[in-house]
Amino acid sequence: MRRLRAGAAALLLALAAAACSEGGTAVAPERTVPERTVPEQTVPGQTVPEQQTAGPDAQEPAAQQPAAPKPDAPSPAPPPPERTTYEIRLTFRPETRALTGVTVVVARNDADAATNELRLSAYLNAFRADRIAERDPVLPEHRKRAYPPDFAEGGLDVRGAAVDGTPVPVEVRGESIVVSLPEPWAPGEWRRLELEWDATLPRVHHRFGMSEDAYWFGNALPTLFVFDGEWRDYAYEAVGDPFYAAVADYRVRITAPDGYAVVATGDEAEPVPADEAGFATTAVEAPRARDFAFALSRSHEAVAAEAESGLRVNVHYRHASKARAEAAAAAAAGMADFLERTVGELGTREADIFENEMFVTGMEYPGFVLVRADRLNAAAGLETVVHEIAHQWFYGAVGNDQVAEPWLDEAFATFLTDAYRLGGKLDATYAERLRAVRADAALGDVRSYDSWSAYWNGNYRLGALMLHALRGELGEDGFARFLRDYYARFRDGVATTEGFVETAEEAYGGSLDAFFARWLP
């Protein structure tokens, strides 16, 4: 993405260490918070002595004596960060598919309950051989595409963990890392976790994987699960996008052999020149991101398009034609302008689309999209590209529990994609789709589906039809107001069905119980 200034790149080379106070409570990394900076001024109500002026009756000032040394005073604690922060160091060795990392996360307990542990994701473990045998993360009908002939398992292990500087027990349980806390994490308290881990990237065609000299890492890094009174440490399901994450600030250093281009969520600095071993390091900064994903490649080329809103879209392609890549970049930029006008400002100034091999056609991450090569190289791929751009607004900016309520992002992404692409044909097309919708189509938890088609018919197709019907209830102006209010209300947060209904009723000016009884489970 956008290159950072050299000074910013240098700043990213150090991890922001968070100290512990005398009472053991974690103190967040030092950072400047401009709104808390108070200029020198008179405190209201304070009496300020008048300055003595020189005159005939003025006494000669006494000779200034050296001030007595004062005892050292403790430095004031730095203010906490605005949100959870991640400082991550990564090293990748392609010849062994080995990814080693150190993750430092500083987080606050925003729930109303305390917890005795921290839980983080370890989704690479879904592709351990024993885990596949026990609970294959790929449905039988997709295994041929997901598992290449030279498939090799992967996984993640933890070397050690420390909380607020104190070593603590840690255990890997399937796709979860469980860290035991020395004392309960109370509501409102900050904690600092340092985690050292080793991983092997599976040779697979999934949200993470590899093909030839390209490697991609979606949902590959350990990140905190959401804690809302209970830990939402969901397993890596075979259907749907089984993820639920909060917005955080990421600072990541990626070290890989020289010659590999880094494409990632956030803004990449120019790589530090290769060391004697031939490894170069790229620093990446990604504020207000719901996740962090990246890719490495020696052979991808890139084209770009710029939206009127200023968003720059880069398409990194290898097997697709340059013409198809340029068309994808233009479609993505156009969709971004449509969403800025219709929904609201995204705030991100750059997005990357990376061609890969994957069993699904596309997958969204903040500022970073994976699109399967054959899809990118087909005219129909433009719909996939535009849909994943819509997810930058719905999933990226407005979050949701994608396991329990997946329609909250998929329905919006589907409806807005259709609104952009179909234009004046939207109403007629949706009327036909409503007549043809499957009788068993239903919104639901991803764990309730046994096929991708059932999941798609419910949360994509039926969810989009509901939004179209809601537009009919609210009217054009009311629906436009609803979209913008809903986006503003839940941006950087987490939307729920209850919040969706409440916002719609506010736009309507009354109850919509009868309407939603026909659509919602």
Image (cartoon, rainbow, N blue to C red):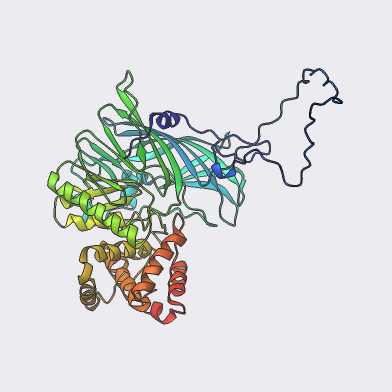
Q: Quadrant of residue 292?
A: top left
Q: Is residue 37 above or below residue 276?
A: below
Q: Is residue 92 above or below residue 188?
A: above
Percent of width and height locating residue 291: 39, 47
Q: Quadrant of residue 94?
A: top left
| Residue drawn at x 33%, y 71% as measured from the top left | 467
The total of numbered circles placed on residues is: 0
Is 443 left, or right, of 453 in this rendering? right
Percent of width and height locating residue 384: 23, 56
Is 339 left, or right, of 429 in this rendering? right
User: Is residue 400 visible to us here?
Assistant: yes
**In this orientation, which residue lies closer to the viewer: 298 or 186?**
298
| Residue drawn at x 84%, y 25% as measured from the top left | 58
Is 419 left, or right, of 19 in this rendering? left
**In this orientation, which residue lies closer to the viewer: 267 or 464?**
267
Q: Quadrant of residue 505?
A: bottom left
Q: Is residue 318 above or below residue 399?
A: above
Percent of width and height locating residue 55: 82, 26
**In this orientation, which residue lies closer to the viewer: 130 or 14?**
14
State the quadrant of the N terminus: top left
Q: Is residue 356 above or below residue 89?
A: below
Which residue is outermost to the front?
A: 56
| Residue drawn at x 32%, y 26% as measured from the top left | 280
State the quadrant of the C terminus: bottom left
User: Is residue 361 visible to us here?
Assistant: no
Percent of width and height locating residue 446: 35, 62
